[in-house]
Image: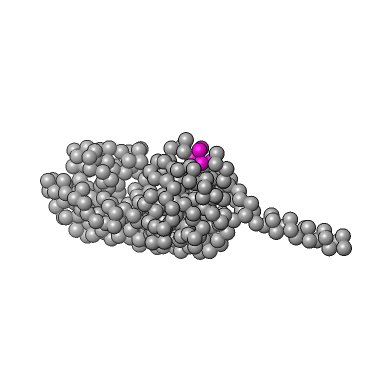
């Protein structure tokens, strides 16, 4: 009887240990849960979309404004907006895991979230490849091993895109994120990486800030062969129309003013590669017009 009881106790201890899950977040902290998360507050549209992509969307009990993909995400309660969160409502949602976008909120907000009690996982994918890594780590924390397959498919597609455009002649790209003041992307931004993947060159890649302000004169001097911006659902707002005053720019002369889908290119999710493929095709078009 004693031996059976000890065996049962050992089985219970092993089962409990096996239920524990942990992953290192992008702040370098090890986040450990006693068991896979069942109630998640997801504080960024891209995090919510990643959770749906790995089959864990039904576990999300709270999210942020603009978390609108897939359509089921629209029904999730909004507990945060740009740079701010509703701490009382987050606590009332009784999450066993909070996943927060590291640069989406001030450090003080992230510290306040940690004081609520539930483990906080800081997500900050800074490169295309890190989208796959992020999904894998979230998969561990929610107990969804199929996340590895989703990540593997993402990596395979990224590899195929890189191979498709490797070695092609470089195309000068100006990426506009705002018109007044005129702002672009620095070389460390993930979209600059996407431009390089396509065989393009961000004409302001040497600038250190993620979103530096530049002058019209600097753009004219750079002579971009394609000018790109992004709007929701790729609906052109007229933000690039100002450049038509400068036909000396190759991009204007060849009518290569391109509007991408911001909901895809600006979110660190599997859909990003859909829009990177569009970007590559348009850069390739510019390459063809220039006879490169």
Magenta stretch contains residue 72: no
Q: Residue furthest top?
A: 108
The quarter of the image holding the N terminus is bottom right
Q: Residue furthest right?
A: 1
Magenta segment main secondary structure: helix
Residue at (27, 41) in percent of width and height: 183
Inspect this view and state whether residue 26 appears: no
**Colour setting:** one colour
Q: Residue 81, image x and y in percent?
A: 39, 45
| Side of 255 where 188 appears, left or right | right
Q: Is residue 104 above or below residue 285?
A: above
Residue at (83, 63) in percent of width and height: 4
Residue at (18, 38) in percent of width and height: 217
Q: Residue 218, image x and y in percent?
A: 22, 39
Residue at (28, 52) in percent of width and height: 230
Q: Residue 198, image x and y in percent?
A: 32, 56
* Residues rendered magenta in the picture: 110-114
In this view of the protein, which residue sits in the foreground, 56 or 258? 56
The quarter of the image holding the C terminus is bottom left
């Amino acid at each position: 009887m004693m031996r059976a009881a000890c065996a049962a106790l050992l089985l219970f201890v092993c089962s409990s240990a096996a239920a524990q899950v942990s992953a290192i977040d992008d702040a370098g902290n090890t986040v450990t849960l006693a068991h896979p998360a069942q109630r998640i507050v997801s504080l960024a549209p891209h995090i919510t979309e990643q959770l749906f992509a790995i089959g864990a969307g039904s576990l999300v009990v709270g999210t942020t404004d603009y978390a609108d993909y897939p359509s089921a995400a629209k029904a999730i309660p909004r507990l945060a907006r740009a740079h701010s969160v509703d701490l009382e409502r987050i606590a009332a949602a009784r999450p066993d895991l909070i996943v927060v976008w590291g640069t989406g909120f001030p450090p003080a907000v992230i510290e306040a979230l940690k004081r609520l009690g539930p483990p906080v996982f800081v997500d900050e994918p800074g490169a295309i490849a890190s989208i796959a890594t992020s999904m894998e780590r979230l998969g561990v924390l929610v107990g969804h091993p199929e996340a590895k397959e989703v990540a593997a498919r993402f990596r395979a597609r990224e590899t195929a895109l890189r191979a498709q455009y490797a070695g092609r002649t470089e195309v000068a790209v100006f990426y506009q994120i705002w018109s007044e003041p005129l702002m672009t992307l620095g070389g460390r931004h993930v979209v600059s990486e996407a431009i390089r993947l396509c065989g393009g060159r961000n004409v302001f890649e040497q600038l250190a800030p993620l979103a530096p302000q530049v002058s019209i004169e600097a753009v004219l001097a750079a002579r971009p062969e394609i000018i790109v911006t992004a709007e929701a659902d790729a609906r052109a707002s007229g933000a690039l129309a100002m450049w038509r005053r400068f036909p000396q720019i190759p991009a204007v002369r060849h009518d290569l003013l391109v509007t991408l889908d911001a909901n895809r290119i600006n979110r660190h999710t599997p859909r990003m590669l859909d829009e990177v493929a569009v970007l590559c095709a348009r850069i390739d078009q510019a390459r063809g017009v220039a006879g490169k």
